[in-house]
Image (cartoon, helix red, strand yellow):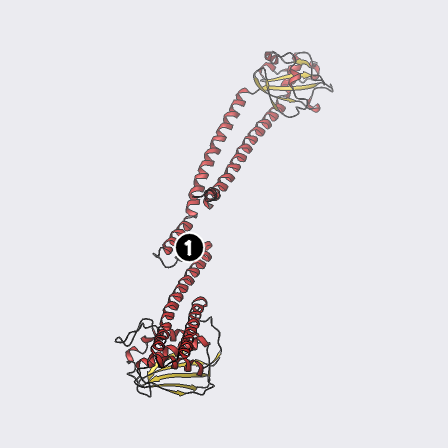
Amino acid sequence: MKLGQFALCRCRTRLRTRVLATSIGIILLFSIALAALINKLYQQNSMAAYSRDLVSQIPMVMAQLSRDGLIRADQLTAWIQSLDPSSSDYMSVLCTPENHTLWTSRDVKAFEVDDICALFPSQATTPQYLSIAGFNVVAQRLSSDKQPSDSPNHLYVLRNVGQEKQQLANLETETWFYISLLFFSASALVVAACHWSFSPLRRLARELIAITESRQQTLDSDYPDELQDLTQALNQMITQREKQKVRYRHAMDDLAHSLKTRLAATNALLDDNSLSREQLNKRILEQVSQMDDMVQYQLKRALVGQRGLKRDDSSLTIPVDSLTGMLDKAYRDKPVTVIRGFADDATLPLHRSDLMELLGNLLENAYRFCLEQVLIRLEDKGDAWQLSIEDDGPGVPECYRESIFQRGVRADQLNPGTGIGLAVCDEIIASYDGTIQVAQSSLQGAAFVLTLPKR
């Protein structure tokens, strides 16, 4: 394999891989976003719970301040004075506006920090996690309306939340675990769904291979709706290809059959000692020209189909003269009299090449089977022309009068032949919406009757 071909193979991406990568990438992004959102909600809920709990602990903070002499007892209610601040797990810190420590509750001294206020953020109006001397705490500054006086100092409330912090970390770990489990489960389902969804395409590929290897004729029709247009188009293409192959095969058979008579006539001319050199060359050139026209005609019919050649008013006299002259040479041992039952200016609405092919096959049959007479008659039937070519030979048995127009069927098994000529005539006349049939001739032989509509 060349380097360019190798690079092309490496760069080509399978459709299934694209779908899987896109789907799993989307699931991964949503999983990460969902886990982050859940953890964020957990933290917000815990902070909201701390904030709500703080409101309920304000009397306990007042009791701590009163016990240390920062608030006069006459400023507090009897209920607050009765509280025991040592039973609270909340701690208090009073800071200057410059975040210097003025006072701390007794439990804060366990942190052994000289200036704890310096560790607080300046705008801690909402609960925030802090790590102080290895302890995990949540801290919040009381708003001015909740402070005990109009002092410019800031009162912070702290709580040791090491256990809660560990629980939150465990919850976050569990969240990531279950989200990961959900991600892998969803990815497995996407892979299975992708495999199932693409199974019709794999089946389509197998059937196309079978058609290529001639093990199948067309694609099945039970595909999903999304592939129906594709399979129908492929079936039409396959059918057209088969028809094209049949046309080419028939064209080659027809060409061989058409050339056979002209080659026989050429051989007869070469054996005719009565012709001068100039006459012989002229006759042979006429045969070669007719053979060339026949080759071009058959190739065109194979390419464009039976209805591809246009209608035209073609003279009947010219092809009859040419063909009878050729057949007289090919059957020079049999004196044949051709009786013409049509005017010299008679025409038929057929393409010139089609008319030549029709008359060539029918007259060649008439010359082969006649005893001594062939009759060519043209009649006007009003809306159609009726052309009949008759002979005084043995005729065609009734059992063969329909099947004789099929390819390969011959009524006469004694004389050589391919059974193609009459089939060609039937195909040509059918392409002009006409009919051809065989009947009993007035000369007691066979009569091939062609009925051709006028335009």
Q: Quarter-wise, where is residue 433 in the image?
A: bottom left
- Can I make out residue 429 in this image? no
Give left or right: position of 287 versus 113. Answer: left
Using the image as rendered, state which of residue 339 and residue 98 is in the foreground. Answer: 339
Using the image as rendered, state which of residue 323 and residue 427 is in the foreground. Answer: 323
Using the image as rendered, state which of residue 165 and residue 28 is in the foreground. Answer: 28
Q: Position of residue 203 (x, y in %)?
A: 39, 51
- Can I make out residue 174 in this image? yes
Image point 37% across, 83% down: which residue?
Answer: 389
Q: Secondary structure at mark 1?
A: loop
Q: Position of residue 299 (x, y in %)?
A: 43, 68
Image point 57% across, 31% down: which residue?
Answer: 40
Using the image as rendered, state which of residue 298 and residue 410 is in the foreground. Answer: 298
Look at the picture and state if 426 lies above or below 442: above
Report which residue position mark 1 lands on. 223
Q: Quarter-wise, where is residue 291 in the image?
A: bottom left
Mark 1: amino acid: Tyr
Q: Position of residue 356 (x, y in %)?
A: 42, 77
Q: Quarter-wise, where is residue 323 in the image?
A: bottom left
